[in-house]
Image (spheres, rainbow, N blue to C red):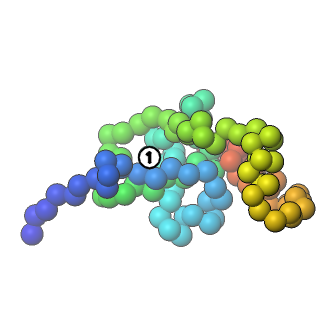
Amino acid sequence: MLFSVIPIMGYRAILILGYPYHYEPYGFLGGKKYNVSMPDGKFYKGLLVLPLYEGALNNISGYAEFSDIFEINENEVNNFDKDFPYKEKQYQKSQDKYEASCIMLDE
């Protein structure tokens, strides 16, 4: 049986920043495997890619460009938080682990 695969809504892959050990079990792999880097041209372990269909990233290379929507400031955060019951903000050690995985080079 012969059939063709149609990209989902025109997208070929999902790109995220995260912990590799959380996302690899779901099929995400480092961007280096697919020749997808960050804008600085480097491959980081925290940049994870999931092709949406077989061969979706064949002959593709480039860099991830994240939306400006993720660029927020403290005032925007505080205004958003006003819509919810007060909860003290706390530092979690996992924040350091996340930052480390996002900046660790995949060499």
Q: Quadrant of residue 74?
A: top right
Q: Among all residues in the image, which is located at the extreme front?
A: 83
Query: At x 78% / y 54%, what residue is drawn?
Result: 81
x%, y% of residue 46? Answer: 63, 50
The answer to whether 51 appears left or right of 54 in the picture is: right
Is there any visible trace of residue 56 in the rendered image? no
Position of 106 relative to 42 (above/below): below
Q: Which residue occupies the foreground of this view, 24 or 69?
A: 69
The answer to whether 58 appears left or right of 83 in the picture is: left
Q: Which residue occupies the foreground of this view, 89 or 38?
A: 89
- Residue that label 1 marks: 34
Q: Which residue occupies the foreground of this view, 12 or 29?
A: 12
Secondary structure under badge 1? helix
Which image quadrant: the C terminus?
Answer: top right
x%, y% of residue 76? Answer: 75, 42
Position of 58 relative to 27 (above/below): above
Query: At x 57% / y 64%, what residue is drawn?
Result: 23
Query: At x 46% / y 53%, what residue is drawn?
Result: 14
Instruction: Inspect the image, locate mark 1, and give the three-letter code of the amino acid beneath it.
Output: Tyr
Other-residue count near label 1 (Cα within 10 Å), few / some / many at <14 / 14–19 / ≥20: some
The answer to whether 65 appears left or right of 91 in the picture is: left
x%, y% of residue 50? Answer: 45, 56
The answer to whether 94 appears left or right of 23 in the picture is: right
Query: At x 67% / y 38%, what residue is drawn?
Result: 71
Q: Quadrant of residue 53?
A: bottom left
Which image quadrant: the N terminus?
Answer: bottom left
x%, y% of residue 51? Answer: 40, 55
Is there any visible trace of residue 34 in the rendered image? yes
Q: Among all residues in the image, which is located at the extreme left?
A: 1
